[in-house]
Amino acid sequence: MNVRGTWTLFSKEVKRFMVVAMQTLLAPVITALLYLVIFSHVMSDRVTMYDDLAYSSFLVPGLIMMSIIQNAFGNTSSSLVFSKVTGSIVFVLLGPLTHLEFFIAFVAAAMFRALLVGLAIFIAAYFYVGVTVAAPVYVLLFGVLGAATLATIGFLVGVWADKFDHAATFQNFVIMPLSFLSGVFYSIHSLPAVWQAVSRFNPLFYMIDGFRYGFFGQSDVAPQLGVGVMCGALLILGILTLVMLRSGYKLRT
Amino acid sequence: MPVAVSIQQLHKRFGELKALNGVDLKIAEGELFGLLGPNGAGKSTLIGIMAGLCRADSGVVTVMGKDVVRDAAASRRNLGVVPQELLFDPFFKVREVLQIQAGYFGVDRRHRAWIDELLESLGLADKADQNMRSLSGGMKRRVLIAQALVHKPRVLVLDEPTAGVDVDLRQILWSFVKRLHREGTTVLLTTHYLEEAEALCERIGIMNHGELVALDSRAGLMERYSHYQARMRLRGMGDNLPEPVTAALTRREGDTVWLQVAHNDDQLATILAALHEHQIQVLEIETAEQNLEDLFLELTQVKRS
């Protein structure tokens, strides 16, 4: 394996988002914290979750995971589309990296950004509402799996998209609605039965629900089921991506 | 001599367009080879397939014996490509760009001296810490060349490297290419500037409509395909010239005729014999060699017609 080559591509991708850190790191953290401040201010006195959990505390894992989802997707998709539009993707394609190395480096960099954003929100929320962590292994597991899955989806979209508008369309009309409707702001048990059933077909629901289990030890579905769903989704998406790269689709015409 | 680049029966279509139609080509190790052809001839597609940026429909391409599809990573380690377009990554500085490109090839930090040497040789030393966005087109072109060389490839492909660059930079690039060639690098150069191919290349291929229509040493090409111009001042010439003269005639003014004469047969002797037979005296005769540009036009236009 070309470890140095893979590390170089990973480092380059990290430097790329660090150069525009205001946009790629600070902005999503501020957005999530604004949600937290506003919703916790408006709702805290009216709603408690899981029997006696304050709404502001309930909100934190959902907001962290939503930010992880959006930033993991945004990093791979925007970087690939940008490289394709400017033509600078050629420099990577001319190198001796295999499809797997190319994929790993891009996804790892997106995961790094997403988890950095998530960590920053966690730290800020810790001081603001005092969240606790009941099962850190699940927090880590769902955080990493969620970031990897969405980075992979972003990779697929980035390869497919011919212009920024394509990637933005996918982000605004698929990722955003699915993340908002995945239980960030509510427990699916508060929904009518039919919408509870529909929510179970939303893969992002398992990410947020499992992540929340890591914080409170309570969730809408068993976290083991969530791990299974996410590992399965990641495996299928990863294989699909590698098949696409091997075929040269939109990259090696 | 060992083969650096081998291309066998290469075919590529883009929809209805036959971009490459059965190209066969071998470039020897250490050779400086020129690939000429009008726009759309298939040169860039050929390079794209060599570099793995493009997939052939059929045919086999190897670089230093490594198949560009089945052994892609190994073949790319032997290949440096300078793309035609002025591509750059606007997030990085010149030195960072070179370090990143070296990293893809597994080149470690101990090779920084080579990056410094490239920066120095290409006149980029004072730009090393500038962002790519701030460079002029010529400077960006130099960075592209440095990027292609950063892993010390044994085969260098330059796809129209001097397109749109000023005379100074062209001279710098020419001398740099000559130096690389002297040091043993195999160079494949595509260009629109025929004087560039004449000045630099030992062997030349001419492509047109996806086919290699000529392939030889520069002198061999001229010998095999070309004509030379003969200007003759004649005495005793009437309105009707002998047939061998009219067959070669390109222009006539007063007592002077201009003829296009083949290199490789006794056409001139036949013309002189015919003139002698018709009692037309040759007062003056002057010949001029055809240049590569004439030959290029002749070959590509003949094919087109």
Image (cartoon, rainbow, N blue to C red):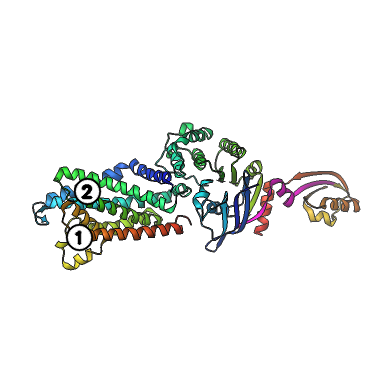
Disc 1 marks a residue whose amino acid type is Ala
| Residue nearest the observer in this picture, B6 or B247 | B6
> Residue B136 at what x, y percent from top left?
48, 38
> Residue B135 at what x, y percent from top left?
46, 37
Q: Provide the secondary structure element on which disc 1 rests.
A: loop
Mark with earlier residue (2, 1): 2
Residues rendered magenta in the picture? B208-233
> Residue A56 at what x, y percent from top left?
14, 50
Q: Which residue is mark 2?
A: A32
Q: Provide the secondary structure element on which disc 2 rests.
A: helix
Q: Are marks 2 and 1 in contact (CB under 8 Å)?
A: no
B213 magenta-colored: yes
Q: Is residue B182 left or right of residue A173?
A: right
Q: Is residue A32 left or right of residue A153?
A: left
- Front label number (2 vs 1): 1
Question: Within the image, what quadrant is residue A202 found in?
Answer: bottom left
Q: Of the numbered discs in the image, which one, if any, rests on residue B178?
A: none
Disc 2 marks a residue whose amino acid type is Ala
A15 magenta-colored: no
Label 1: chain letter? A
For mark 1, does the 10 Å Cα neighbourhood hold few (<14), some (14 to 19), or many (20 or more) residues? few
Q: Is residue A46 left or right of residue A183?
A: left
Q: Real-space Cα distance between discs 2 and 1?
A: 26 Å
Question: Within the image, what quadrant is residue A205 found in?
Answer: bottom left
Q: Residue furthest bottom?
A: A194
Q: Is residue A177 visible?
A: no
- How many numbered marks does the figure carry? 2
> Residue B151 at what x, y percent from top left?
50, 41
